[in-house]
Image (tube, helix red, strand yellow):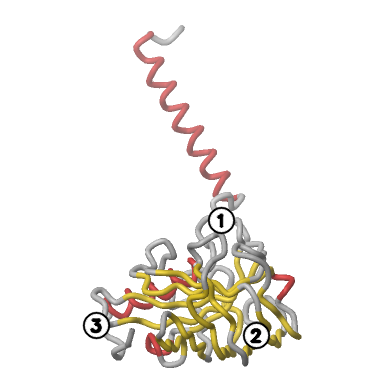
Amino acid sequence: MPLPLHCRPVLALLGAVSLLASVAACSDEQGADDPLPITPTRCAVYWARENTLDDPPSLDFFAVDQPISAWDTGPGSYGGPQGAERDGTFAYRSPDGSLSLAESIGVATDGDFDLVIEGVAGGDDVTFTDSTGQALVDGRVVMAPPTVGTAGAASFTGVWSALDADTSSAIDWGTGTVTILYLGSSITLGGAELGGMSSYAQCYDAEAAFAPVPLRGGRIFHDVQTSTVSSGTRHGKGSR
């Protein structure tokens, strides 16, 4: 005997719910919701300091960013015009760790440095040394950018942080400093700045929208600021 018409929509709804539950269970069993693996294409070393004289405190940070294939033991170099495959970018007084809101940007497009690299996997040793100053040009001027400073002596010793480390607590912090001569001032990044959480190295996927470098470095250092504020601690006074 056929069901009354008023009962049929109820059975149809129950059937749809059962089907959705089955699909969800299958998806979970197959791990469809698991994060996709990260395939790194570039690596970078970062240094930062906090300007506590600003309210709220701003960040200065410097990133040496290259294709993953360029991170090998031996001499390395910055190269090419702005936006090139290998460069160093300095963000001056960024209120949130972004490049877009930084007061100004300097870019190193020429010069040499030395690398000692165990590998490019998370936990592998990385040492960066730059004993000479590299000219910084205005990163917001495309045609014939003027020189705005110098990226001086720099060093970093540490390991590559894990690919999925995206908070300050997950980063493997290294040691070392870089001295920037910028707009007439001497600025030291790294070292004891930000409570010692001021230099690190990490590889990343350049195609991932959440992780463009050096913006990623700025985000991590901003996370350091946010974490210390929420925990009630504060770093020593910086200088402009």
- Report the mark closest to the observer, 3 or 2: 2
Q: Residues within 10 Å of mark 2 (few under 14, many from 20)?
A: many
Kindly state the secondary structure of the residue where label 1 is placed. Answer: loop
- Residue 152, given in percent of the width and then of the height, sits at 54, 88
Q: Can residue 202 be seen from the camera position used here?
A: no
Q: Residues within 10 Å of mark 3 (few under 14, many from 20)?
A: few
Kindly state the secondary structure of the residue where label 3 is placed. Answer: loop
200 above or below 176?
above
| Residues at discs 3 and 2 in contact (Cβ within 8 Å) | no
153 above or below 160?
below
Q: Nearer the viewer, residue 100 or 35?
A: 100
Residue 227 falls in image quadrant = bottom left
| Residues at discs 1 and 2 in contact (Cβ within 8 Å) | no
The circle on residue 169 is none
> Which residue is under mark 2?
126
Callout 2, which amino acid? Answer: Val
- Residue 195, given in percent of the width and then of the height, sits at 38, 89
Q: Which numbered disc flags the more N-terminal residue, 3 or 2?
A: 2
> Which residue is under mark 1?
34
Callout 3, which amino acid? Answer: Gly
Q: Which numbered disc flags the more N-terminal residue, 1 or 2?
A: 1
Disc 1/disc 2 C-alpha distance (Å): 30 Å
Callout 1, which amino acid? Answer: Asp
The C terminus sits in image quarter: bottom left
**Relative side of 199 to 71, left or right:** left
- Residue 116, given in percent of the width and then of the height, sits at 70, 88
Q: Nearer the viewer, residue 148 or 50?
A: 148
* Residue in the image at 46% along x and 87% along y: 190
* Residue in the image at 69% along x and 78% along y: 77
> Which residue is under mark 3?
232
Kindly state the secondary structure of the residue where label 2 is placed. Answer: strand
- Report the mark closest to the observer, 1 or 2: 2
